[in-house]
Amino acid sequence: MMSETAREQRKPPWQAMILALLFFGPLLAAWLLYFHSDWRPGELAVHGELIDPAVPLPELHGVGDADPLRGHWSLLYVSPTACGADCREALYRMRQTDTALGRRGARVETVMLPASEMPDRGFLDREHPDLIVLPPDSPAAARLEASLPQAARADGTGILVVDPLGNLMMRFDLGSDPKGMYEDLKKLLRVSRIG
């Protein structure tokens, strides 16, 4: 007669093999999919153009009580001329995005840098009462304009995103879907603990 211990030794190790398969199977499958196939997990969808590396912008003292590009997220529009159709579209998008952000919108300021002349103040007061407009002839505006990278200068085709530390970090083209700017800002504000 076989002892109990001998019977246990003769059993096939199927239980151990199943446990090993349950543990190592998903790891092996993930490794094969990632390194030996065209499949990749969904990547982070960014609708705007990331500015890498981020460009530190100068402090803008003398524009009001506080620096308009510090302490909060900022949507900045640099207008090349008087506020025409592209300018009005950019300001509208900035306002709508700020409004759509709801309570998170309190962490976002909208700022305009007119490159040559001040836009119609009546239009701005009526349509964009919370917009901060930097006087184009001020030293602060000149410093800001000089510090912008060439792609972000006064071409009037994009809206810039400045982080609470004063770094230019993203650009949204006016020809792109406006919902993309909202989605990107919503993600930024959700994960950011500053501003």
Image (cartoon, grey):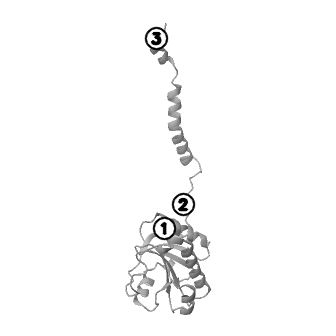
Mark 3, residues whose alpha carbon is within 10 Å: few (<14), some, or many (≥20)? few
Q: How many marks?
A: 3
Q: Nearer the viewer, residue 195 or 82?
A: 195
The amino acid type of the residue labelled 2 equals: Leu
**Helix, strand or loop under label 2:** loop
As displayed, is residue 38 above or below residue 131?
A: above
Q: Residues within 10 Å of mark 2 (few under 14, many from 20)?
A: few
Occupied quadrant, residue 174: bottom right
Q: Which mark is residue 3?
A: 3
Badge 1 density bin: few <14, some 14–19, many ≥20, Cα 10 Å: some
Mark 1 lies on a secondary structure that is: helix
Where does residue 104 sit, x and y in percent of width and height? Answer: 50, 70
Residue 3 image offset from top left, x and y in percent: 46, 11
Is tag 2's residue or tag 1's residue first in the polypeptide sequence? Answer: 2
Q: Residue at x 56, y 92 (%)?
A: 122
For the point 60% across and 70% down, the residue is: 179
In the rendered view, tell whether residue 60 sits above or below residue 71. Answer: below
Q: Give me the C-alpha separation between circle 2 and circle 1.
A: 15 Å
Residue kind at label 1, given as amino acid type: Leu
Q: Residue at x 50, y 88 (%)?
A: 115
Q: Give the numbered dot on residue 189.
A: 1
Q: Tags 2 and 1 in contact by the CB under 8 Å rule?
A: no
Circle 2 is placed at which residue position? Answer: 44
Q: Is residue 28 left or right of residue 68?
A: right
Disc 3 to disc 1: CB gap under 8 Å: no
Front tag of 2 and 1: 1
